[in-house]
Image (cartoon, coloured by chain):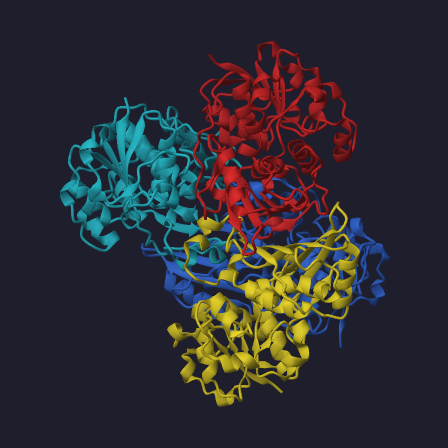
Chain colours: A red, B cyan, C blue, D yellow
Amino acid sequence: MSHKIAILGASGYTGAELVRLIATHPTFEIVALSADRKAGMEMAEVFPHLRHLALPTLVKIDEIDFSDVDLGFCALPHATSQAVIRELPTSVKVVDLSADFRLRDPEEYAKWYGKPHSATDLQETAVYGLTEFYRDEIRAARLVAGTGCNAATGQFALRPLIEAGVIDLDDIVIDLKAAASGAGRSLKEHLLFSELDEVVKPYATGGSHRHLGEFDQEFSKVAGRPVQVQFQPHLIPGTRGIVATIYVKGDAEAVYGALSEAYADEPFVIVLPQGNIPAMKDVRGSNFCHIGVAADRRAGRTVIYACLDNLTKGSSGQAVQNANLMLGEDETAGLMLAPLYP
Amino acid sequence: MSHKIAILGASGYTGAELVRLIATHPTFEIVALSADRKAGMEMAEVFPHLRHLALPTLVKIDEIDFSDVDLGFCALPHATSQAVIRELPTSVKVVDLSADFRLRDPEEYAKWYGKPHSATDLQETAVYGLTEFYRDEIRAARLVAGTGCNAATGQFALRPLIEAGVIDLDDIVIDLKAAASGAGRSLKEHLLFSELDEVVKPYATGGSHRHLGEFDQEFSKVAGRPVQVQFQPHLIPGTRGIVATIYVKGDAEAVYGALSEAYADEPFVIVLPQGNIPAMKDVRGSNFCHIGVAADRRAGRTVIYACLDNLTKGSSGQAVQNANLMLGEDETAGLMLAPLYP
Amino acid sequence: MSHKIAILGASGYTGAELVRLIATHPTFEIVALSADRKAGMEMAEVFPHLRHLALPTLVKIDEIDFSDVDLGFCALPHATSQAVIRELPTSVKVVDLSADFRLRDPEEYAKWYGKPHSATDLQETAVYGLTEFYRDEIRAARLVAGTGCNAATGQFALRPLIEAGVIDLDDIVIDLKAAASGAGRSLKEHLLFSELDEVVKPYATGGSHRHLGEFDQEFSKVAGRPVQVQFQPHLIPGTRGIVATIYVKGDAEAVYGALSEAYADEPFVIVLPQGNIPAMKDVRGSNFCHIGVAADRRAGRTVIYACLDNLTKGSSGQAVQNANLMLGEDETAGLMLAPLYP
Amino acid sequence: MSHKIAILGASGYTGAELVRLIATHPTFEIVALSADRKAGMEMAEVFPHLRHLALPTLVKIDEIDFSDVDLGFCALPHATSQAVIRELPTSVKVVDLSADFRLRDPEEYAKWYGKPHSATDLQETAVYGLTEFYRDEIRAARLVAGTGCNAATGQFALRPLIEAGVIDLDDIVIDLKAAASGAGRSLKEHLLFSELDEVVKPYATGGSHRHLGEFDQEFSKVAGRPVQVQFQPHLIPGTRGIVATIYVKGDAEAVYGALSEAYADEPFVIVLPQGNIPAMKDVRGSNFCHIGVAADRRAGRTVIYACLDNLTKGSSGQAVQNANLMLGEDETAGLMLAPLYP
């Protein structure tokens, strides 16, 4: 039996990625696609790479008949997302890919996103969408908040270590390198080819990146006490992919052990054999996250490397994984596409 | 019922691409993988992006029990390929991805590849693997010769026009831009990142590219008289993809009509709506070929643009498409993966 | 003795390139820099790579005291340029880098640029800035119109051949590949890194690129009769550089001879030894243009390859070269910087 | 008066970069170029971008008449370098760009480079070539050892801080991103375009990078006690440039103050205004090093960002800077070329 799917905000990169994944999903059927400013256009006009698919015409959200929809993916900008989801019939399950429902605390939301949340009641009920750590809640949820792509990468590396108590909680440095599609299709000077090609650029310096809100919330929750990491993202001349190089104080064997145990039965999170370092191209276009560990020459210092594709495991793939759970499907349905290499 | 598949020469890019495609193919099962210099290694050591798959260990070709194999993909270098295929049991169907069986005439082979063919009897029986034009022969074949990736691109644009008689056969210019993976994983100075990044380089100048042998053979056959095109390839700073810009003398409407008609029912070759120009990213990682047409400002001069992914439609995807036919499967089985964009 | 230089429109790529070149020019001194929307800022804020230089603060054009200026480079958008230059005191020599004064015929201007020219009297007096072919006129000029970067590339390859009568004037195809900086720093979706990386894209199809106006004007003038070439540009994933692959009918030896003779004494245009093909990186950041020639396998068909850096020889370097002549300096002053390789 | 210069090992990237810089140097004259395997070739055949220069033919080292040479740049691989320099007449001053004379302690050399040093007497007399910190010794030296490019980047950021005592010496993390030309022109699989494009790859994990030998030696010397930093390099899809993101414990104001003071009068090392973060393109092709500082949200944690071009300030530019001092020239002679942007 197929599930009727709507994608709200289908004209951005995460929207296109959802369509790509659902195109070969065995039981999801796209019944509605929205894009306010492009309403009336065919998806093939916006994204010619989807031309081979029979897809609904793009419409405005209020033109969608939601009585026909089992689940909506909401790939809208934050702030817009709250306003839209608030109005959806409660019969529609929702996976939100924006930042709007990631933070539990309205004050934290206001602090990181610069204005008060307009749907705090919904915010309370939303489940944080890091599938591997919230499976049961996600299965039962009506509203799941997709995580930040950087936030997901860091958490895959660090949650098991905090849980296992094998690292110093006050001395964690996440040096992260993220490809340009994470910034979406927005027209900004620093995203121009001539500006970005051949260079790696630190940005959001000084602990100002919004995904720190997620790190703070989740790591503190796991630790049972406040944890604040240091997080420096860099923009890289690549289209898809994130690699995080994470410096911790803790024994490398203990770190490797905790990660291996945590992910032993996970289909998508793979701890590489010792001595292997993950590579961005090895997960490109797939829902996999690869993790490696190296001991520094100085005892007690360890580096963890975590890699995923920001548009897939970091966003739309994660969203489909969560939707699978919410709709009673196998968690991996439609998501076993092998990475595109080279 | 599943078909037992062997991949000979699995440690190159086309070998990896075959594994990627077969990973989600409904009825193909990989039972053997060979790589002479890497025999004994696991595929995950050579290609970590395939780590999530349960795959046979790499072996030498003579360690494979071919009684268990329905079809072998041969992704070996040319010359090696003839020697290997000659020795395979005739019960094994073969799709060869090398250049060894593309040319019918042993003298043409010797001219373009610099030495005599060592399996001329097999050469006679091989079917040229451009699926859309040799379907019936491929269904019945034991040995199919995968086409050159550049040769495929040019032919998708030009065969229907030659067939329809709408262009001047003596004035065809193919200016082609091809990504680096077409040269494989070989260690050559001009393929180094520092040499190739940010530049487009003409190569094989003066009509010296080997795929001209295929163009000459096929276009002359279609035309019923000798046809020699002008063909200038360029290496581009990209990993996957080919775009051919083809200059012909002929009426643009007639050209567009001939192409539209030829591909009206094809699942993988898409003639874009008038005014649309194909883009390399729109076919990345997929088995699609996109074609566009533009009239020049001067009447009677027309440009055709053809785009495909050299590793997929230009090589391993085409090979799976042919294998589907040879094994009685639906031609599109396992090949409807949507392109990876952006 | 130093010459006082103003740069109008200093906040774009060609403006920055002018400053880079003048930074080590022996006799040019920058006395004014304008950038309307960034007036009041320091150049180091707009272009941090120029931070080591002592430069005037950016101002609005009407804040510049032109009595102190010997020569102004005008790096403004077309249309704006005419309006600005019209108002400059005639004591100021001008090198315009926009398209505004390239075409002699007001109707041609209106046709290619979509509106009438507003300074047709100036247009009449402007000299076309292709230095190697207009030296004497440039030395004597008050206003020199910098050429289009694509137009320059094609002309370096073709003018001597038209002049020498060694090619068929009715069958010239220019397939050109141009890096992204040629489109400037403008915020357009197709210029985003995620859209452009790894792909080569045909654009301005069907003979619609504005530089055709220059080709038509100049080639017809040289030939003494109307000449219309076919010109298809492609955007490439590179920051700087143009390579044109030009298909002509004519004898390769005669072509090579005509080019060698024409450029024998030129400091910046280099015809490579036979068998050599130019490469974009070989001219990067320099004022050189490299040209190569190859005979096709079919007699009477020849390919010419021409390469230059669009921001240097194609624009700001050419502008400095012209300014050198206009100010009585050695033509090569400040321009012998070696290309940046790799 | 000009100085006669020889470049030994002119066929690699650092050799080509030396020629590029010397091409516009006011007083250096290249009288000999060596390249053992390419002896007899013209430089223009190896590096066509240098075709416009009149350069000596490449020869074998023993064909050079060193009586005519004031200074030799030695751009040979390590180990080869020691053997060659040992045999040069002592009348020839030498700037070595290899790793052979960077480490003072023969045991450290053997540890990091895997075999004993064969010219330990010379090793004793060599001066470490980080110009800004060894000016007087360099002026008086016969043999100067160019630093590692990564080692230079880290030291520009950290030496003044260690000197000033403003950071915790036991908790320094250097996360460095380096472009591919740092690995030279060697044919290695991971340097192929198809492997490296679009990805950032950690390498030399676990504190195994050889430049740690330089960090250990120099930082311990400055501190007056052993200092061991944590250093994780990453290969990036770029041709030129290094950016180091350095995590320290110390007050951001104190850090900024120490750096500003240290480099107040330096021509090439620029501490950016507060709030500015350096960018790789801003130093491309130039001898500048840009440094920025940001306070983390948690007091007492500071990040320093340092950027330079590995082939220029990190290698050949530094070498020319040192040669200027050794030959009594102005330190900046020939080195004020503005960065190439974009």
Residue at the image position 42 percent from the left and 55 percent from the top: B191
Q: Is residue D180 above or below residue D106?
A: above
Horizontal side, residue D250 vs residue D172: left or right = right
In this image, A148 relative to B189: left or right? right
Kindly indicate the quadrant of the structure image that contains residue D334. bottom right
Rendering coords of residue A136 (x, y %): 57, 20
Q: Residue furthest left?
A: B121
Depth check: C233 or C34 in front?
A: C34
Which residue does the image show at 23% across and 55% down from the upper left? B114
Q: Position of residue A260 (x, y in %)?
A: 49, 37
Residue A73 coordinates in the image, percent (x, y):
59, 22
Q: Does residue A101 appear anywhere in the picture? A: yes
Residue A146 in the image, given as x and y percentages of width and height: 61, 28
Relative placement, left or right, of C2 versus C138 is right
**Image quarter hosting the N terminus of chain D:** bottom right
Residue B246 position (above or below residue A2): below
Quadrant housing residue C320: bottom right
Q: Residue at x 65, y 84 (%)?
A: D328
Toward which corner of the image does residue B300 lie, by quadrant? Answer: top left
Q: Is residue C140 visible?
A: no
The residue nearer to you, when weighing D45 against D198, is D198
Q: Quadrant of the C terminus of chain D?
A: bottom right
Q: Is residue C328 above or below residue B337?
A: below
Question: What is the count of numbered marks?
Answer: 0
- Nearest the viewer among D145 and B190 is D145
Asked if residue B121 is positioned above or below residue B31 in the image, the reply reads: below
